[in-house]
Image (tube, helix red, strand yellow):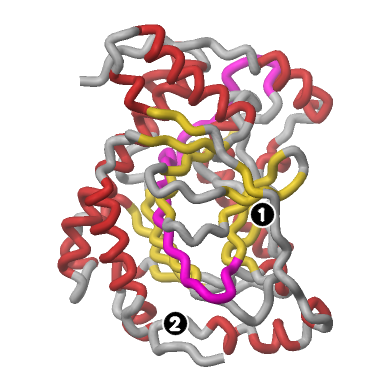
Amino acid sequence: MAHSDSDPPLLNHYGTLLCHSTQWDEPQTRVTMEECQLPLIDLCDLGSDDEMVRRACAAAVCKASSEWGFFQVVNHGISSQLVDKMRSEQVKLFRAPFETKATSGLLNNSYRWGSPRATCPNQFSWSEAFHVPLTKVSDEACYGDFKSLREVMTCFAAAMSELSRLLAGILTENLGHWKQASISNICDEKTCFLRLNHYPACPISPEIFGLVPHTDSDFLTILCQDQVGGLQLMKDSKWVTVKPNKDALIVNIGDLFQAWSNDVYKSVEHKVVSNATTDRYSIAYFLCPSFDSLIESFVKPSIYRRFTFREYREQVQEDVRKTGYKVGLPRFLLKGSEDLTTTTTESNTRLYIPSITAKS
């Protein structure tokens, strides 16, 4: 299979893995998955003069976070012009020669591709990415020859950051007013990330993931994707495909919000499936706390033991090293809390509707 010099050597690197796996012994066909329409929330309502409209919008955010763990937002404050400019610069970046991306230290030397620890095809991601700390987004030294990317990416990151804090504020207020201040205290640009993703076309097998099934190890993630599609999530114990919406951003709850909310909000497993003929691009913003931030449930009895973000990341990385898979929150369940997860979740889904003041 021919590749341009911009593509990472995914097939070459994993040739032995793919060629010797029984997973490819029989011809594969691409399975058509059920397509879902995520809850769609118009954030324009947060600026309404009618308090009931504002409260209803905030309640919709909390309800979707509890029932789906995923939702879409429109009128989110990030202009289509900025999104288009960011996408154009992103495509230009990924079309650079592979050697340039891999060896020139671009974007804080954050380039990554494939799955280096994969030992079997179902641990393998057919993709490449730049995972950039927010503190480096405005650093001119990080951009090399891609000078035009800096201004656009700085504006885009700032807009995504503002949106993430708006949504986090709604979700934390729903858990009780005392949580409101702490989200801004533990999450700032030193701890958050912007990830530029590229999923090259992969015609060799429908079984290869663009990104392996996982949950996100953060408070929440905001995703800006193109119209190619491929994002799937677990809903009612089955995989469903998310239909792209050109006007919407996708928001999903991360592991830390699930633990913090004592399972009121759901961190849902999701993945990206590869596309046989078309490249896919997306940009994700990750709202993360400082490494030493303490994560604990806001009500008792608590389902999870207290842990720091550093401890959580280290445990995830250790599990991936040993098994090839992330285990995540089940590692932090308190003894006996397995029986509490259902009853606690059911009792906590009666959502408090926060009082939201109109946006200026």
Q: Most prominent secondary structure in the magenta stretch?
A: loop
Quarter-wise, where is residue 268 in the image?
Answer: top right
**Residue 70 location (% of width, % of height):** 55, 38
Quarter-wise, where is residue 206 in the image?
Answer: bottom right
24 in relation to 293, above or below: below
Q: Quick one: SS at disc 2?
A: loop
**Which amino acid type is shown beneath numbered disc 2?**
Asp
Q: Nearer the viewer, residue 260 or 33?
A: 33
Residue at point 23%, 66% (across, down): 142
**Residue 11 location (% of width, % of height):** 59, 85
Q: How many labels does the image show?
A: 2
Quarter of the N terminus within the rendering: bottom right
Q: How crowded is mark 2: few (under 14 residues within 10 Å), some or many (20 or more)?
A: many
Q: Distance between the residues labelled 2 and 1?
A: 27 Å
Side of 132 where 70 appears, left or right:
right
Please report the bounds of the magenta region as a residue range: 274-302
Task: From the image, tell me which residue sits under label 1.
Answer: 326
Asked if the magenta segment contains residue 15, the reply would be no
Residue 315 shows in the view: no
Task: From the image, tell me which residue sits under label 2.
Answer: 7
Q: Nearer the viewer, residue 2 or 164?
A: 2
Asked if the magenta segment contains residue 300, the reply would be yes
Of the numbered discs in the image, which one, if any, rests on residue 42?
A: none
Asked if disc 2 and disc 1 are in contact, CB closer than 8 Å, the reply is no
Residue at point 75%, 38% (across, down): 236
Q: Quick one: SS at disc 1?
A: loop
Of mark 2 and mark 1, the one earlier in the sequence is: 2
